[in-house]
Amino acid sequence: DACGNSSSCTIMVTVTDGENPQVFCKIGKGLDFDGANEYVTVADNAVLEGMGALTVMGWMKIDALPVQNYAPIAKENAYRLIIGANGSFHFVVATNSNGWYSAGTVGSGGSNLLPTNKWIHVAGVYTGSKVNVYVNGVLMGTSTGTISGNIVNNGSPLTMAFKTSSNIDYFNGKMDEEGVFNQALTTAQIKTY
């Protein structure tokens, strides 16, 4: 679990939104982002970095594709899910042996994968040697080449729906059941979410 298998832990979460962000979603209640200035920030925490394997995933319903890209879940310069303007989807990691966007650090699923106005489940997995992307429990792409090392410790907060850089737009849509796991979940495990 995100707390290092302990029975409890505290991680501070800040939701930046001028309105009530809770809406009924895929499973119970989730968050609705307007694409203008709403996002979630989770303060840097040792349980969110330094792991030898990683899964980042969640349900989302995209209201409109981005002009540039969306980063629905990101720990900038450590790991990031990306949705492109053409409905493409990829997951990138940086390890203590492999830099940000260097050879083998990106798993890509291609274009036109992610529709608008429909609930989809996306997952990015770092196995310790490969980066994989899943859509609705189906493996859609794997990184080329082999990488190694633990996810970098860089002090960045974990963000959801945030404009993390100049080529990223604020997310426009709904998110539910987002998660970061300190292990590489299997295809069978991903399908259970």
Image (cartoon, rainbow, N blue to C red):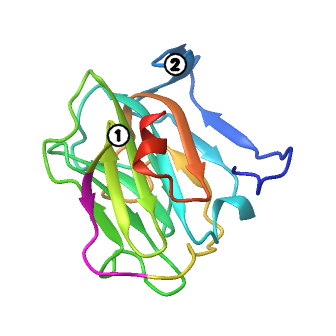
Classify residue 102 as left or right of residue 108: right
Residue that mark 2 sits on: 27
Q: Is residue 144 magenta?
A: yes
Q: Which mark is residue 25?
A: none
Classify residue 125 as left or right of residue 138: right
Q: Is residue 7 magenta?
A: no
Amino acid tagged 1: Gly
Q: Quadrant of residue 165?
A: bottom left
Q: CA distance from mark 1 to mark 2?
A: 17 Å
What segment carries the magenta color? 140-147
Of pointers 1 and 2, the one earlier in the residue sequence: 2
Camera-nearest residue between 184 and 62: 184
Residue at disc 1, secondary structure: loop
Say which residue appears at 21% left-offset and 43% top-offset. Answer: 67
**Is residue 45 in sight in this rendering?**
no
Residue 140 image position (x, y, % from top left): 24, 51
Q: Are marks 1 and 2 in contact (CB under 8 Å)?
A: no
Q: Quadrant of residue 138?
A: top left
Q: Is residue 146 above or below residue 58?
A: below
Residue that mark 1 sits on: 137
Say which residue appears at 33% left-offset and 54% top-offset. Answer: 133
Residue at disc 2, secondary structure: loop
Q: Is residue 141 above or below residue 40?
A: below
Q: Quadrant of residue 124?
A: bottom left
Considering the whole magenta stretch, tell me its main secondary structure.
loop
Q: Is residue 147 above or below residue 188?
A: below
Q: Is residue 179 above or below residue 168?
A: above
Say which residue appears at 44% left-offset and 84% top-offset. Answer: 98
Say which residue appears at 57% left-offset and 77% top-offset. Answer: 150
| Residue neighbourhood size for the residue with mark 1, other residues' Cα within 10 Å, grouped as few (<14), some (14–19), many (≥20) | some
Amino acid tagged 2: Ile
Residue 162 image position (x, y, % from top left): 47, 46
